[in-house]
Structure formats: structure tokens, C-alpha cells
Amino acid sequence: MADGGVIPLGPVELAIAGGLVLVAGAVSLALRLKLEHKLGVAALRTVVQLLLVGYVLEWVFRIQSPLVLFAVLGLMTAAAGRAALARSSRTFAGAQLGAFVTLVLTGLTTTFAVTGAIIGVRPWYHAQYVIPLLGMVLGNSLTGISLSLDAVLTDLDEHRERIEMELSLGATAWEAARDSLTDSARRGMIPILNSMTVVGIVSLPGMMTGQILQGASPLEAVKYQIVVMFMLAASTSLGCMSVTLLVVRRVFNERHQLRTERILRR
């Protein structure tokens, strides 16, 4: 290994790491948790997906084409939107498109703001910076959007009597749904807020750890991680607020009536 480089890993090292999963499977068998099959499938998917991504990214990094970059970003965002909805117990017509547009607006805007204005990536379509940063943004944003979406739809569905009473007394859709919206946005923000609270004390985030393993100065790695945490907080909060506002537009009509039949249970 060269000074400041990364220690290369071969098949033997990866196989030894796989033994850690076998240990978890053995514990599952011993305690009759019946999780060994799921662990095996999850481990296999992890290997296949990450190796495939590794080969694709090597190809994308070599090409350095804006068209290829945006094709990859589009696929990543579409997959994130689908994953966000898959975790919600309720949905509504057009939710898939709404989640995708929300992630595009919040994720891409935040990512390119960081790469262009803060880091100063040149050229602006440098895939080696844009794709990993967007991946982190989407991973956190989809969790927040999923939690907020599920919370606001559940609250509007289960408390429709209270909301309809407020509407009958002259409240607007926004006024009647405000408590549901604020509580749902807060719930979606909990994971990123928890991460920001304990970062550096309890956990060392992946990007910071990776840079340190590559030989970067810990202080320089910390600076990048601070930028990343602020980026994740901004994109997640914007995503949570945007998706809850979208719900109000879809489940209330122009006469400020709550249309609970538009809330679909899975």
C-alpha cells in the first residue's frame, strides 16, 4: 500500500467479511429467530448490487458526460421515490410522480448547490463528486419523506371528524390540516436530527471515515462532513415539508373539503 492510499481488498478478505454474516445467521438459528434466510438474501443482494454499481460507476467516471450523468441521477431519483412510497402504509393517486418531483427539486438543487457553490467542482458535471453526494441526499431524504407521508396521510384519515368539524366552522384546508402537517414534518426530520446530534461523538459518518481511510487529514474530513450534514438537513427538511404540502393539495379540493376517499390504504 502506498502512503495515503487505501488498503486493497481481494476475494479472500471479502469472504472473511462474509463470515460475519454467517455468525449472525448462526445466532438466528440458535435462537430460532428464523432470520437466516432473510440475512442470506440480503447479503447476496448487497454483494450483487454493490459490485454492479462499482462497475457502472467506473464506466461513468471515465466518460464524464453530462447526458450519462443525468441518466444515472434520474435512475437514482426514481428508485428513491419508489422506495419512499413502498414504506408508507397509505398513498394517493399521483404519489409516485409527486415523490419523484420532490426528490428532484430538493435533492438535485441541494447537491448542485454544494458541488458548485461550496466545493467548487470543475467541471460542474464531475460524476465522482455529484453521484456520491446525491446518493447520500436521496438516502436520507427518502426516509424523511416516507415518514412524513405516512404520518400525514394516517393523521388526516384517522382524524377526519375533527378536521371536517373545523372546516365546517370556517377553517381553511391549511388551518384544519396545520397540526397534521407540522407533526408529520417533525417526524420526518427525526432521523437526520438524531444523526446531527450524535455525529462525531457516537458515530463517524461514512464519508468522513472513507476520507480518513484514504489518508486525508481528519480535520479536512471533518470539514467535508459538516458540509454534508448541513446538506442532508436542508434536503430532508425541504423534502418533508414539500411532500406534506403536496398531500394537502391532493386530498383537499378547491372548496376546502377533505376527500378521504383519495387516501388509499395499501
Image (tube, helix red, strand yellow):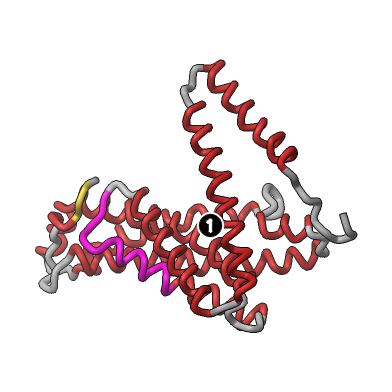
Q: Quadrant of residue 260?
A: bottom left
Give the x, y percent position of residue 197: 61, 55
Give the x, y percent position of residue 59: 60, 66
Using residue 223 as the reference point, say whether residue 248 is left or right of it: left
Q: Quick check: can you spot residue 57?
A: yes
What is the three-letter code of the residue carrying label 1?
Answer: Ile
Q: Please tell me whether residue 121 belongs to the stretch shown in magenta.
A: no
Say which quadrant the C terminus sits in.
top left
Q: Residues within 10 Å of mark 1 (few under 14, many from 20)?
A: many
Indicate the secondary structure of the residue bearing disc 1: helix
Q: Please tell me whether residue 96 belongs to the stretch shown in magenta.
A: yes
Using residue 126 as the reference point, say whether residue 261 is left or right of it: left
Q: Quick check: can you spot residue 229?
A: no
Q: Is residue 16 above or below residue 88?
A: above
Seen from the viewer's position, the closer of residues 145 and 266 is 266
Q: Residue at x 55, y 77 (%)?
A: 112
Q: Residue at x 38, y 60 (%)?
A: 81
Seen from the viewer's position, the closer of residues 175 and 237 is 237
- Looking at the rendered structure, the number of numbered marks drawn on it comes to 1
Give the x, y percent position of residue 49: 53, 50
Give the x, y percent position of residue 51: 59, 51
Q: Which residue is mark 1?
A: 192
Seen from the viewer's position, the closer of residues 221 and 155 is 221
Using residue 51 as the reference point, say whether residue 181 is left or right of it: left
Using residue 55 as the reference point, say whether residue 154 is left or right of it: left
Say which quadrant the N terminus sits in.
bottom right
Magenta stretch in the rendered image: 90-105
Q: Residue at x 64, y 26 (%)?
A: 23
Q: Residue at x 67, y 49 (%)?
A: 203
